[in-house]
Amino acid sequence: MKLNKTLLAGFIPALALSLLLASCDAKDEPIYTPAPTPTDAQRVHFLQSSMTMEVQQQEVGSFDIALERVKGTEAQPLTVQLVATSSTPAIIGAGITVPTSATFAEGETSTIVTVTYDSKAMDVATPYDIAIALAENGNEYSVSTLNLRLQVSPFTPWAPFANATGAGSIHLNILYEEVFPCTVSYRESTLDPAAKEYRVEVPDALDEPFYITTQDDGKTLSIAAQGVLTHPEYGVIQICDLVNYKKNPGYAKYNYYDPATRTFNYAVIYYVPAGSFGNGLESITMAE
């Protein structure tokens, strides 16, 4: 499928690499000394230094965190101790439970730590920060502490919008000048009934779904900048409504949901760093 539009502005040339290289004097370059390889077979590490999780309200569940140890040391089983701390200490063991140890089986260089949570013991929309550290086995050359942020979503679970399946049709006037089938789901804020989010999926035309938000039950819609399609030459194409893109509230009159016609209306632009593919009015009409 070909895009209807071509890019309206060319790429801006980047500075030549030679200009950067010319500014460096070899005499000033530091001498590289590689870090020594850990010799302690007990050294292990997390695969990431931070992790953010959003969970549903009134939910009991779990998620996994991966640990690895130095390759070549897997001949023996290994158990390591974990220590969890938080700026909200009472949440550990109540709303969030982190195991105090993790075990590597014989012959394995990786293992999983399962963290459990009970969102009923947590406040909605309040971030809980927990640091999970290796008590004695941290690899000083890698990640020995994982910083976890857990938050209870202020929204209800996603559900089909307007009809049983969320079926609708979207007029992609700018990129294709065609109409495509789409699926729209939504969720409501439990803190503000007028605040909603809509997720629009167009698998026949866009690589990624895009999201529409409202704070006034659809009277005004907002589409923040977000990637929806990867162009083979220009990279990720983003969609954004003109209110956000141009920082001009005058375009807000074009962004609204009409319940009488079951239609989302909005003025948007599609762009990449090198330029745009145009802007204008588009719409989504929900099936009855």
Image (cartoon, helix red, strand yellow):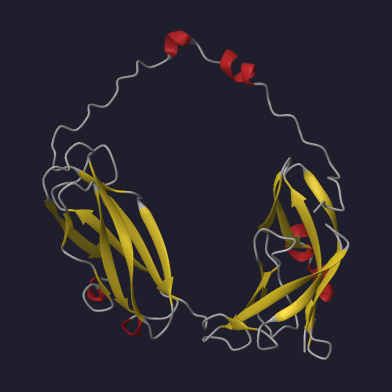
Quick one: which residue is furthest to the front in this view?
Answer: 107
Looking at the image, is 40 positioned above or below residue 198? Answer: above
Image quadrant where one finds the C terminus = bottom right
Where is residue 203 drawn, in percent x and y?
69, 64
Where is residue 87 drawn, in percent x and y?
28, 66
Looking at the image, is 138 positioned above or below residue 229? Answer: above
Where is residue 260 drawn, in percent x and y?
83, 91
Q: Residue at x 19, y 33 (%)?
A: 38
Query: Quick check: 46 left or right of 248?
Result: left
Q: Nearer the viewer, residue 143 or 194?
A: 143
Q: Residue at x 38, y 17 (%)?
A: 30
Q: Nearer the viewer, residue 245 or 176?
A: 176
Looking at the image, is 30 positioned above or below residue 27? Answer: below
Find residue 33 and report its image quarter: top left
Looking at the image, is 256 positioned above or below residue 9? Answer: below
Query: Quick check: 166 left or right of 278?
Result: left
Quick one: which residue is furthest to the top in this view?
Answer: 27
Figure disc tally: 0
Where is residue 73 drawn, in percent x and y?
16, 39
Residue 196 visible? The answer is no
Find residue 211 and report its image quarter: bottom right
Image quadrant where one finds the N terminus = bottom right
Residue 159 visible? The answer is yes
Q: Residue at x 74, y 29 (%)?
A: 13
Q: Residue at x 71, y 71 (%)?
A: 222
Query: Quick check: 153 left or right of 240?
Result: left
Find residue 64 and report its image quarter: bottom left
